[in-house]
Image: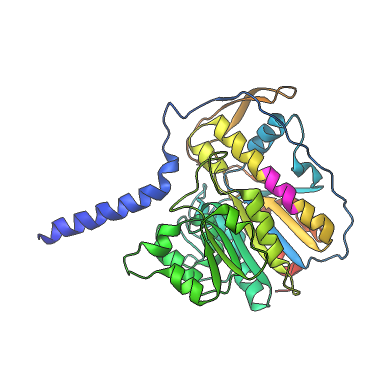
Amino acid sequence: MNLKLILVLVLIFGVQQLYSQENYKTISKEDSTKTYPGGKPYEVKTFKQKFKAKKPKNVIMMIGDGMGTTAVFAGLTANRGHLFLDNFKHVGFSKTQSSNGYITDSAAGGTALSAGQKTYNGAIGVNTDTVAIKTVLEMAEDKGMATGLVSTSAITHATPASYIAHQGSRGSYEDIAADFLKTDIDVFIGGGYKHFTVRKDKRDLTSELKQKGYLVLRDMDEIAKVKSGKLAGLTSDEHNEVYPKRKMNLPIATQTALNILDQNKKGFFIMIEGSQIDWGGHANNTIYVVNEMLDFDQTIGKALEFAANDGETLIIVTADHETGGMALTGGDMKTGMVKAAFPTGEHTAVMVPVFAYGPGAENFTGIMENTDIAKKIMKLLGF
């Protein structure tokens, strides 16, 4: 076969693989729903603000991908004026710019939040020279702490990948999956099963995970039953479906992971991502954004319940960037109706909110760089 033709076919195949993971960015008129009509609200509990120590033993990092202040307020409106985020008394803002762009992508944004360094768009856990940089999750492992990742996307996607992998390109999904085998992460739950099993190198990473002592499960009901040990929950071939269609349940996955990680006497670090707030922004779909925001907030409620009972857990809730430039053009606190407009289908450069609860929360106020969040966590944990 002609060499040029081979190269073209390889390029096409690679682009198709990447597109299958990035097609949530495609905007269609059918999907661009501007009004959320309102739904049944859920009860928001108030949690105590007294803690056992000044510094945390555990850290729960929660990233609402693409979640700007407008998405938060849209969720608040939809739930009749209250969110679990109401419990967070320490609030700040994060500047999200990457090393090579006024507007970041999730890879550079995730790496800034995981490793405390600015890098180029597309980079996963590497600096601007593509050299691996240690993340807070890896530092926690080094200290003997338990670690975890939970995501409504593929677990190999940019944000969760930036905490555990080191690759020059966010599209290197199979290489990112292989990086999981180089760590001692205790629990991870998300999509991306194919990246562990249907691979160019013919490796079956799920078999290798089992050899390392992991329980590898695909069914959410079975995952929810696990109380201890090492768990790899791969809930979808690639990404999980949208809420409420998806079988992967983010609040339950979070509760399961926390129960497992809490077995470690030295503490734990976990990152939990509500991935698809971002995808709703890309789709200019108000219903999508609101549904994902409410799902993420109910997950925050699970984290709060744990942290309030524990008294030694710091929760940070933030975003890697805002998506869509979402503007609220109408709404009703009584019915939960939200109407929005979007000037773009891409990310924007605006600051995103930072919410903190628990020991050390007072350190996360004011305007800060996204890299400051990781650095503050590292300092509080003594890294």
Q: Is residue 376 visible?
A: no
The N terminus lies in which quarter of the figure?
bottom left
Q: Is residue 290 above or below residue 304?
A: above
Residue 357 in the image, given as x and y percentages of width and height: 79, 53
Vertical side of 26 occupied by 195: above or below? below
Count of all numbered marks drawn on residues in the image:
0
Q: Look at the image and say whether residue 299 sits in the magenta stretch.
A: yes
Residue at (31% x, 50% y) in the render: 16
Residue 61 drawn at (x, y percent)? 67, 57
- Colouring style: rainbow
Task: Find out whether residue 292 is within the magenta segment.
Answer: no
Point out the residue furthest to the left here: 1
Q: Is residue 348 left or right of residue 92?
A: left
Residue nearest the viewer, comparing 268 with 113:
268
Please determine whether, in this image, residue 129 is positioned above or below residue 75: below
Above or below, 301 against 108 in this view is: above
Is 256 on the left-hand or right-hand side of 35? right
Q: Quadrant of residue 286?
A: top right
In this orientation, does residue 45 appear? Answer: yes
Q: Nearer the viewer, residue 327 or 298?
A: 298
Q: Residue at x 49, y 38 (%)?
A: 282
- Can you give x and y, in whole percent of width and height, for residue 174 in the image? 40, 63
Q: Main secondary structure of the magenta part?
A: helix
Q: Residue at x 70, y 74 (%)?
A: 383
Q: Position of residue 269 (x, y in %)?
A: 68, 65
Q: Residue at x 76, y 74 (%)?
A: 265
Span highlighted in magenta in the image: 297-303
